[in-house]
Image (cartoon, helix red, strand yellow):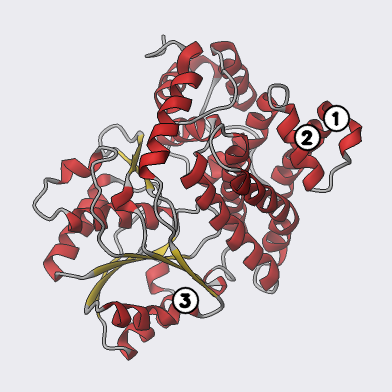
Amino acid sequence: MSIISPSVVPSISRRMMKGVLSIMRPSKIEVRRGPGVRGEVGAYCKEKGYRKVLVVTGPIVGKMEIAQKLYEGLDATGIQHATFDGIQPEPLFSGCRSGSEVAKQNQVDAIIAFGGGSVMDSAKIIAATMAYPNSPFKRFEIPFTAFRHFPLITIPTTAGTGCEVTFGSIVCDDKTRTKRNIGGPGYTPEICFLDVETTENLPPALTATTGMDALAHLTENYLATAGSAEVKRMCEEGVRDVLEYLPRAYHNGSSDREAREKMMDSAYKGGVAINASGAVYGHALAHAIGGIYHIPHGVVCGTILPEVLRYYQEPCAEQLAKLAVVCGLGTADEGEKLLAGRLVDCVLALRDTLKLPHTIKGMHRNDLDAVKKEFWKQALLFPAPATIRETDLARILDWLAED
C-alpha cells in the first residue's frame, strides 16, 4: 500500500509546488560565461570583499589540471583558500557535515563549488550551515529550514544537473541511503561561472549520463503544470539543442567546443526551469530507484526517461507534439499522436546512441514494492500534469525491470 491514495497525488503536488515555488523561487542569479572564466573567480571574491574561501570538490576533479586555473586566480588576487575534497557521487549527509566542519574551522567568507551535481548539492548544505553556525546539523537534513544566505559560488564541471543555479539539493540519508530533497532560499548560489573548458575532457560515458539528466529536466519541466511561457520556450530550446548536440559532445567532446557550449547552456536552462516549475514523475521515480539500487542519478535518468515519456505520450500528446515540431521531427499538421510518438522514438534512439542501458540493474519484477513505496513519497514534491495510477506505475516499472 502507498502512504497516500495515488489518485490525489497530482492535485496535492500541484497545489504544494505552486505554493513552494512562489515562496522559494530565488532572485536572479548572476551568470558569467566563457572559456577560462573560472580564472576570474578570485577577482570576483576580491571585489565582494571575501578574504578566505573553501573550495568544495571531489577527490578526483579537485586534483585535475582544470582546477589549477581556479586556484591560480585565487592566488593572484590574494584570496586565501582551503579545500574540502571529500564529496563522493550520490553524496551523503555525513560528507556535508565533514565539509561544514572544515568551513567553520577555517572561518571562511564564501564557499566555491567546483565539480558536478554531487559537489553542488553538498556545497549548498555546507554554505547553509555557515549561515546558521549555531544550529545543529540535523536542521539541514530537513527541507525549507534555511532562509539566510551565505555566499556560494558555483563552477560546474559537467553539463547536466543544472544544480549550479537551483535552490534545491539532493542528498542521501546515511542509514537508509534514500534520497532527500532539501531546498530553500538559503541554498541558492549568488553567482555561477559557466566555463566550457571544464567539460571538454569529460569522458563519453559521463557526457552521456549528465546530458540525459539535462534532457530529463527540460522535458519534465516542459510538461510540468507550473512555469511561465518564457520558461516553456527555454525548455523547447534546450530539448532541441540536446537532441542535436549531445551525440556530437559524446562522440567528439574534446574537439567540438560548440557542442560542449550548447550542452552547458542546455543544462543551465534545465536548472532555471526547475526553479520556475519543478520536474514531474520521472524525477520522483529516478530518486526512488537511484536511492534503493545505488545507481548514479544520470544513469537512472538516461535509462528511464524514454519509458516515462512513453507513459506521457497519451495524456500529454499535445505538449509532446509541439515539442516534436520545435525539434524538427515533423510539422504541426501531421497529428498530435504521430508527432508525440516521433519524439519518444527520438529519445529512445538517443539512449541507444549513448549506449545507455534499457533496464535497471538489480531491479526485478518480484521485488518492486520498495520502489513503489518510495516513489509515492517522492511524488508529492512533483507537479505532474496527469494522474498516475498504481497500474501506470506498475507498467513503467515492468518496462524497466531486468526480469
User: Is the residue marked by circle 1 packed among few (<14), some (14-19), or many (20+) residues within 10 Å?
Assistant: some
Decide if residue 358 is on the left or right side of residue 47.
right
Please tell me whether residue 143 is drawn above or below residue 353 in the rendered image: above
3D distance between C-alphas at marks 1 and 3: 45 Å
Q: Position of residue 115 (x, y in %)?
A: 42, 63
Disc 2 secondary structure class? helix
Disc 3 secondary structure class? helix
Residue depicted at 21% across the width and 70% down the height: 109
Disc 1 secondary structure class? helix
| Closer-to-camera residue (285/154) | 154
Please tell me whether residue 161 is drawn above or below residue 68 in the rendered image: above
Residue 321 marker? 2
State which tag comes first along the sequence, 3 or 2: 3
The mark total stands at 3
- Which residue in the structure is indicated by mark 1? 338
Instruction: Tell me the quadrant of the picture where the C terminus can be found.
Output: top right
Please tell me whether residue 94 is drawn above or below residue 78 in the rendered image: above
Furthest-right residue in view? 333
- Which residue in the structure is indicated by mark 3? 66
Residue depicted at 42% across the width and 67% down the height: 61
Question: Between tags 1 and 3, which lies in front?
Answer: 1
Q: Is residue 48 visible?
A: yes
Residue 207 location, quadrant: bottom right
- Whether tag 3 and tag 2 are in contact, CB under 8 A, the answer is no
| Closer-to-camera residue (54/394) | 54
